[in-house]
Image (tube, rainbow, N blue to C red):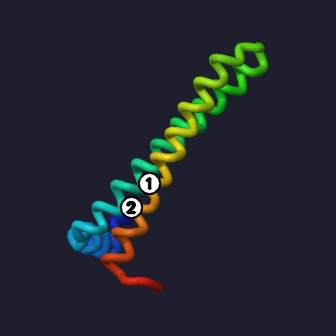
Amino acid sequence: MNSFDVPLALSLLTQASCLTEKSKKAAEHHKKASEHLTHAARHHGEAAKHHEAGHHKKAAHHAHTARGHVIHARGHAEEAVKAHTEEHGKK
C-alpha cells in the first residue's frame, strides 16, 4: 500500500497554483525580512564579542550594521502586510 496522500497532494498543488502576484510579493518580503533579521542577529553577536574584548570601535560598527538590517527588515515586513491587505482586505 502506498502512503502517498493524494487528496493532500492535490490540495497543496491547488494552493501553489493559486498564488497570486500579491501573495508571491508578500512571501518574498517575508523572506527578505527574515534574512535581514538573521544578519542583524549575527552582527549583534559580533558586537557583543567585540565589547567583551574591549574593541569598542569594532563593536559599534557591528551594532550600527545590525541596526541597518533591522530597519530594512521592518520595511520588508510592512510591505508584506501591505500586499496581504491589498489582496485580502483589512480584518
Q: How many labels does the image show?
A: 2
The kind of residue tagged 1 is Gly
Task: Specify the quadrant of the image occupied by residue 23.
Answer: bottom left
Q: In the visual, does 6 lie left or right of 79?
A: left
Task: Specify the quadrant of the image occupied by residue 51.
Answer: top right
Q: In the visual, does 34 lie left or right of 17?
A: right
Q: Classify 49 as above or below 23.
A: above
Q: Position of residue 26 (x, y in %)?
A: 35, 63
Q: Is mark 2 on a helix, strand or loop?
A: helix
Q: Mark 2 and mark 1 in contact (Cβ < 8 Å)?
A: yes
Q: Where is residue 86 in the image (x, y as percent from the top left)?
A: 32, 76
Foreground residue among 13 and 65? 65
Q: Which residue is drawn at 72% across and 27% down?
A: 48
Q: Residue at x 23, y 70 (%)?
A: 20
Q: Classify 6 as above or below 56.
A: below
Q: Mark 1 points at which residue?
A: 75
Q: Decide: few, some or many residues near mark 2? Use Cα within 10 Å; few <14, some 14-19, many ≥20.
A: some
Q: What element carries label 1?
A: helix
Q: Which residue is drawn at 47% across and 42% down?
A: 36
Q: Where is residue 77 in the image (x, y as percent from the top left)?
A: 46, 58
Q: Mark 2 points at which residue?
A: 79
Q: Classify 88 as above or below 74.
A: below
Q: In the visual, does 58 lie left or right of 8?
A: right
